[in-house]
Image (cartoon, rainbow, N blue to C red):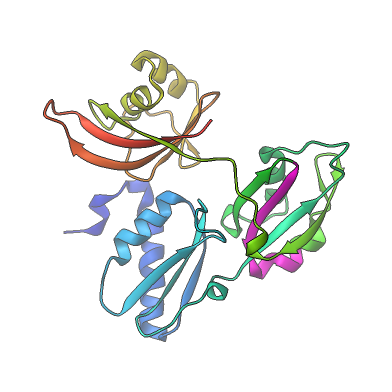
């Protein structure tokens, strides 16, 4: 049975990457740390690595409840530590009395540095404090290059993990049922509006799954998917808990607003 049949066709490239990482650890007897992975990628890595003897994995994003995490794969005799994940926490210092910065501005400025999203972890907000996690290998580069966000001049200050602010974004979990795992029916169930309305959102390009715009109504949702509906907030499929007696899928979903 091929491992690929359990995942989406477009995820084959990432699965191959995970298999390459696993082979590298097996052949070199040395640990391998990945870029920051989104929840769906973490789920795939867990499934591919599994509980096979000889290779273990751990996930860490700077805080225990981080959404984006780096994975560390290592031989079973290796004792891992937080330092192995090579993560740095930066706080953004800016003129707070005169400027308000929002998540899209911060992410956009980080992306404008020419680095891929996987080099950055979660972006944290607490009132006027803003922090973000980044890969250790880029810390010098971003410290030199990130000089402004929007119209605000900024500087970066390294912080220990103990100083990480607690993000206000918490998942509120609930159990819903859906007649299928199609994107339009799942959105209807989670956001509690008509299937026609959910189809309109999808067809208008207002829906993203795992940060990718999806316009296919029959796109099949899976566990750990992050769904974003413009103007309606984000949701996460925490668990697909089998079917009910009425042959509907029972889904444990989290919501953010």
Above/below status of 120 relative to 195: below
Residue 95 shown left or right of residue 137 in the figure: right
Residue 203 higher or lower than 8, as above or below: above
76 vs 92: above or below: below
Q: Is 67 left, or right, of 17 in this rendering? A: right
Which image quarter: residue 99?
Answer: top right
The structure residue drawn at horizontal position 74% and vertical position 55%, both measured from the top left corner, is: 91
Instruction: Report the magenta residues as a range.
Output: 128-141
Residue 26 spot, x, y in % from top left: 35, 81
Residue 197, given in percent of the width and then of the height, sits at 41, 15
How many marks on residues? 0
Instruction: Give x and y (percent) for residue 8.
Output: 32, 46
**Residue 13 seen in this snapshot:** no
Toward which corner of the image does residue 53 lie, by quadrant?
A: bottom left
Q: In the image shown, does 175 or 225 lie closer to the viewer?
A: 175
In which quadrant of the rendered image does the N terminus lie?
A: bottom left
Residue drawn 29% across the image and 49% down it: 7
**Which quadrant holds the C terminus?**
top right
Residue shown at the point (31%, 24%) measured from the top left:
185
- Residue at 46% over, 42% down: 210
Q: Is residue 129 magenta?
A: yes
Does the image show residue 69? yes
What residue occupies the far left of the structure in this picture? 245
| Residue 84 to residue 69: above or below | below
User: Nearest the camera: 10 or 72?
Assistant: 72
> Between 24 and 177, which is closer to the camera in this rendering?
177
């Amino acid at each position: 049975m091929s491992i690929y049949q359990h995942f989406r066709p477009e995820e084959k490239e990432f699965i191959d990457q995970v298999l390459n990482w696993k082979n590298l650890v097996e052949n070199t007897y040395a640990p391998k740390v990945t870029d920051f992975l989104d929840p769906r990628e973490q789920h795939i890595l867990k499934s591919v690595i599994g509980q096979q003897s000889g290779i273990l994995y751990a996930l860490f994003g700077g805080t225990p409840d981080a959404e984006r995490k780096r994975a560390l794969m290592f031989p079973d005799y290796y004792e891992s530590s937080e330092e192995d994940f090579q993560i740095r926490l930066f706080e953004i210092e800016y003129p707070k009395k005169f400027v308000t910065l929002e998540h899209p501005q911060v992410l956009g400025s980080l992306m404008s540095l020419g680095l891929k999203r996987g080099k950055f972890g979660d972006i944290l907000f607490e009132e006027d404090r803003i922090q973000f996690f980044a890969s250790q290998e880029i810390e010098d580069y971003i410290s030199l290059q990130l000089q402004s966000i929007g119209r605000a001049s900024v500087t970066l200050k390294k912080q220990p993990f103990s100083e990480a602010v607690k993000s206000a974004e918490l998942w509120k979990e609930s159990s819903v049922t859906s007649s299928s795992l199609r994107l339009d029916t799942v959105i209807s169930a989670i956001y509690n509006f008509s299937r026609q309305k959910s189809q309109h959102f999808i067809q208008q390009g207002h829906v993203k799954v795992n940060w990718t715009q999806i316009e296919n109504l029959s796109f099949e949702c899976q566990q750990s998917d992050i769904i974003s509906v413009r103007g309606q907030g984000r949701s996460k499929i925490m668990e697909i808990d089998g079917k009910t007696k009425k042959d509907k899928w029972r889904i444990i979903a989290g919501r953010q607003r």
